Image (tube, rainbow, N blue to C red):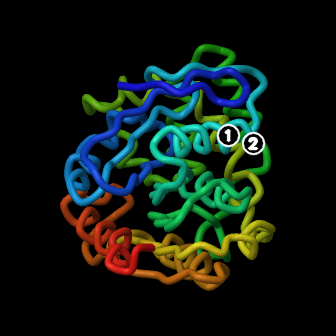
Amino acid sequence: MDTVVSRDGTVIAYERSGEGPAVVLVGGALSSREAAAPLAQRLAGPVAAVSYDRRGRGDSGDTDPYAVAREVEDLAAVVEAVGGSARVLGYSSGAALALEAAAEGVAITHLALYEPPYIVDESRPPVPADYLDRLTELLRAGRRGDAVALFLTEAAAMPVEELDHLRRSPLWDAQEALAHTLPYDATIMAESTRGDTFPPRLFGNVHVRTLVLDGGASPAWMHRAAQAVADALPLGQRRTLEGQTHRVDPEVLAPVLLDFFTADEALGS
């Protein structure tokens, strides 16, 4: 594990595996660099896979008050630490964060986005306007499990039967441990989860080759979001991974990412 100090003094922990051009993995809600390890292991070799703990998670620090701009600075600090520029994969709300970073001029050479959870039409209900307020109240009351359940059912649109199964699984404790960071992801996504504010203001500023990925077995609203994002980006393209869901198999995802991230190597790009 290495660390880098972000602009506001927050210490950000990261790991680098392999040699070659750096690929920074930006996790979504309720994830840490540990969750990215299986994908990082499969990428390492042709590229240097870099996973990091977003602020408030794992071995990284945190500083109040929260702002999306601070997370953009965190990603910029990691990119600078691993070579000054990088390929970037953003997963779920981490994809929205990566887009923010690209729009702000962080040195991203290629961008891959897996299922950015924008609500672009009426194919699913919008996230309720009071979602963040209710989430914050649950966390203030120490009801971390209920906060996770609220996120999964209202923001992630998880069916109740799946939630019940997850509550009984070994994964639940780890989800609760990161519950305090859920407002961060809610803030990142707030502008684009009401169903009437797409495309976000920043898309036209992202002049970076971008691959938008979705899983063939994911719900329709995820497919529509992926297509809308690819269409809105000046250099965007979309690819669907058949049989995959939001919990994509690293063995399926890794070769697709390697093809995209290394396609220009022979040209020196």
Which numbered marker is on residue 69? 2
Give the answer, above or below, for where 16 lies relative to 260: above
Quadrant of the rendered image containing residue 105? bottom right
Give the answer, above or below, for where 128 lies relative to 123: above
Residue closest to the eye, 148 or 4: 4
Q: Residue at x 80, y 68 (%)?
A: 201
Instruction: Locate residue 69 relative to residue 111 in the image: left or right.
Output: right
Identify which amino acid the numbered label 2 is placed on: Ala
The quadrant of the picture occupied by the N terminus is top left
Quadrant of the rendered image containing residue 150? top right
> Secondary structure beneath disc 2?
helix
Assess whether mark 2 and mark 1 are in contact (beta carbons under 8 angstroms). Answer: yes
The quadrant of the picture occupied by the C terminus is bottom left
Which numbered marker is on residue 73? 1
Residue closest to the eye, 38 or 86: 86
Percent x, y for residue 265?
A: 35, 73
Q: Residue at x 33, y 48 (%)?
A: 49
Percent x, y for residue 7?
A: 71, 30
Give the answer, above or below, for where 122 lies relative to 189: below
Residue closest to the eye, 258 or 181: 258
Percent x, y for residue 12?
A: 53, 27
Instruction: Locate residue 212 relative to residue 126 in the image: left or right.
Output: left
> Secondary structure beneath disc 1?
helix
Instruction: Locate residue 140 relative to residue 39 in the image: left or right.
Output: right
Q: Residue at x 71, y 28 (%)?
A: 136
